[in-house]
Amino acid sequence: MSDAKAPVSLLIIDDNAGSLEMLSSALAQPGVEIMTASDPEVGVDLIHNRRPQIVLTDLVMPRMSGLEVLERTMEFDPSIDVILMTAHYSTESAVEAIKKGASDYLNKPISISTLRERIGKLVQEAKKRQRTVQLEDELLASAEFEGIIGRSPLMWDLFSKVRRVAPHYRAMLITGETGTGKDLIAQALHKLSPAASGRYVVLNCSAVVETLFESELFGHVKGSFTGATTDKAGLYEHAHGGTLFLDEIGDMPLSTQAKLLRVLQNQEVQRVGSLTARKVDVRVVAATNRDLRAAIAEKHFREDLYYRLSMVEMQVPRLADRKEDLPLLERHFVSKFAAQYHKPIQGLTHRAQILLSLHNWPGNVRELENVIGHAAMMAMGETIDVMDLPVYLHTASGPMPEILEPVMAGPDANVGTLEEQERLLILRALEASGGNQSQAARLLRIGRDALRYKLKKHNLQ
């Protein structure tokens, strides 16, 4: 969790030692950590390693201009506020700097009171962002309902229905597109029902061979068909005292649908080949991504079974219909995969978040989970950026950095392990930079020290 009381860090870059000392002294204030660099290359490394919230840089410096510092900062993290200072002010250069992402463009000599006021406003904005991150963490904790993340009105309404229905239902239907989380709603219903202490049994109807469906669901007795060498209880019996989740029920054969309807009505199961029925106490939750009314019209689904199941029907909304939940879901999955991959990933850059918000998410929450999982695997630093996202998302943001094209879209795209992917990315960066470690670190958006550690780790010294 972010600490809202953590100091705001300010980096001052100026090749004039006197200016550095004067600015450091003038801008010192409680709650602000000031770093300085007289060499712009060192300053850029500090930006990668220390990630300051504010950068104050001179425009004209040897080897690297303030505009180059601005460009490299924006490439690394567009949320960093950069102020340029120059004694050679022109409207054209000011407009160019603002277009490239500068927060301000000041003319030297700068009034200390004016500079303090400008920096003071940016410090307050940075503190607000820190507090926002902390509130988002708290909001994520409060927006979780039985393992499901959501705070949109559609999800609040769904959670409310689950709470009301869970104590009473005997059979119900959950509808929604693939990847919306129908299985999570089914688990929530089970956990909140009187059957919570019983088993939660799952049958994916699209994964069972039609000829074995009744045996799988209702069981069989020895000798009832070739291969039935022993008596076997079906999943319905196995769920006695608990909940049976029938996923993709639209793929259930018609003959099995008829038998399921009788079991729902009588609460009795008759194994294949048996003459006697067994009493069962099972709550049934069925789910489908298909339009069952259309399936009824096409004679692929029994109308009487549909009405039996849909006495209580819940529809899980598409992710596209609850995009206000995207930031929370992103935060949840980043935390999950950072822990899974043992990586210090803190979140996504603003431009990566914007790109994700523009996508229509046909695969819903499951697609988002896969995207964040992929990006967390590819990320080299503490944040996920556009270049870390799967290739198909980049059409909305222009071409990806060339360094990643051979890795993410070429023959190396399916290299097996996380370690191999990381090693390959480092090699590509070193090739692209002609062996210059500082430039390779910038391409990978990590600090030079972090690159040195990874070079040693992968024996690439």
Image (cartoon, rainbow, N blue to C red):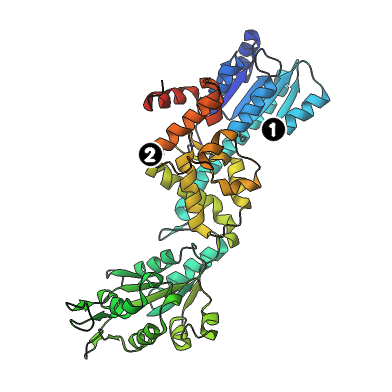
Distance from Cα at disc 1 to Cα at disc 2 = 33 Å
Instruction: Give the residue at x 62% y 9%.
Output: 17
How many residues crowd mark 1 within 10 Å: few (<14), some (14–19), many (20+)? some
Badge 1 or badge 2: first in the primary sequence: 1
Which residue is the site of mark 2? 342
Q: In which quarter of the image is residue 46?
A: top right
Q: Could you say which is closer to the camera, residue 456 or residue 318?
A: 456
Q: Residue at 52%, 28% (x, y): give it.
A: 429
Give the residue at x 51% y 73%.
Answer: 290
How many callouts does the rendering have?
A: 2
Name, please, the residue furthest toward the top: 18
Residue 111 position, x and y percent, is: 74, 18
| Residue 194 visible from this viewpoint | no
The image position of residue 230, as x and y in percent, is 16, 77
Q: Which amino acid does label 2 sit on?
A: His
Helix, strand, or loop for circle 2?
loop
Specify the quadrant that holds the N terminus. Answer: top left
Q: In this view, does 317 lie above or below 452?
A: below
Could you tell me residue 36's position as x and y percent?
57, 17
| SS state under label 1 | loop
Of residues 177 and 104, the one drawn nearer to the viewer in this rendering: 177
Q: What residue type is labelled 1?
A: Gly
